[in-house]
Amino acid sequence: MTDCTNAELKDLLPALGQGTLDAAGEASVRTHVAACGDCRAELALLEAVRMHADAVTPRVDTSAILAGVLRATARPRVLPLKPRRPWRARSYVAAAASVLFVGALSLSAIARTFGTPDGASLGGSPALSGDVDSAADVPVYAMAGLSVGGGLSDLTDAELQSLLTELEQVEATVIEEPSTLREPFVDTPVNDTPEGF
Amino acid sequence: MFLGEPGTAKTNPEDADAELIARWQSGDQRAAARLVDRHAQALARFATSLGVREEIDELVQDTFVRAFQSLGSFRADSALRTWLFTILKRLLLDRKRAERRRRDGVELEEAHAVVEYDALDSLVAEETARKVQEAMAGLTPMQREVFTLRVTEGMPYGEIAKVVGSTEGASRVHYHNAMRTIKEYLNDD
């Protein structure tokens, strides 16, 4: 059997076996193979190689592979925010109100002890200045340097309501999730995969 | 007339892959299933031709995982299957390096990484297939790889060159040398 000299057609024999030639190409190669013993033998050899490759390759479990792939490439879902319990929100409001109340009391005490912005002298408290007579007219909490004067008790209902509204705003800010936590998860691309494709 | 080469006119599987990739990237898991269906067995065949005998499913799965995580870097200048083969080969090299390090701490040379083509024993009963197997055992690793990609996967030389890290012309030469070696072996037998 003489070797085929039609290198171009001979080179298409693997594609003929794979069924990847277009109709015209396939017809052309088949016509050549019918008349060429060398190419017929080579085509048979290629078929044997393919059979051999299929015979020694175990069938893969595509379902298991797919499941593994989907597991490994799953994007973590953004967890929904837990609904806040009403009692918890109210406790934040109460805590904030307490802080403001104590703060107001403290400011008032400091003002009475060391003077007030309107020019009252330091030590103006009768209890601290030793003025016992006048001290008798002073409420106990004032003698202790404590006073609600200028504090919450001086607020009108409207002002108090306004303060509570502001506190509600503060509480809402606390509940709000930082926006960065809501960003969708983005997979970091693996850098060691082949490039140039 | 060969897909991926001038004259190709048949439905191009690369177009289908591109569409499936786009669907997968937009969240369609059925597209992932189709991609796995289309390429898993070919990847297993390629792994077998490279001498892999164990944990082929895991290797194929790892290949898909790596590919799906890096689809952003796939520029579609070549076929998806070519890219997958390249990833599988790299994973295989990593695995062999790790095994070698564990065994004796010697770094594996890439050029000699794929040398095993063990006797494929009783799975192949047919006489012709047995002879082909013996003939292929006489090929160099590069010849065997090129020959397998050309014959069993129908890859054009340009794509083969990307997988084996060579040139199109060199791939063609490797293929013809492999064919000559096999024919000589079969004629002498």
Image (cartoon, coloured by chain):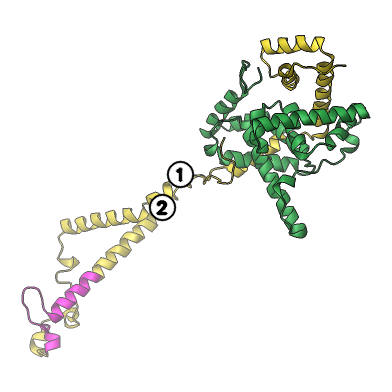
Chain colours: A yellow, B green
Q: Tell me if B36 is positioned left or right of A187 in this view.
A: right
Q: What amino acid is labelled 1 in the image?
A: Pro
The correct choice, above or below, for B138 with respect to B103 in the image is above
Q: Position of residue B56 (x, y in %)?
A: 75, 41
Quadrant position of residue A119: bottom left
Q: In the rendered view of the protein, which quadrant contains the C terminus of chain A? A: top right
Q: Position of residue A165 (x, y in %)?
A: 24, 54
Give the residue drawn at x 67%, y 30%: B169
Q: Which residues are magenta?
A: A103-129
* Element type at mark 2: loop
Residue B140 part of the magenta-drawn span:
no
Identify the residue under disc 1.
A184
Q: What amino acid is labelled 2 in the image?
A: Arg
Specify few, some or many for label 2: CA neighbours under 10 Å numbering under 14, 14-19, or 20 or more. few
Q: Tell me if A106 is positioned left or right of B155 in this view.
A: left
Q: Position of residue A111 (x, y in %)?
A: 14, 76
- Which of the two residues, A127 or B45, is positioned nearer the viewer here? B45
In which chain is the residue bearing label 1?
A
Identify the residue under disc 2.
A84
Residue A109 part of the magenta-drawn span:
yes
Quadrant position of residue A9: top right
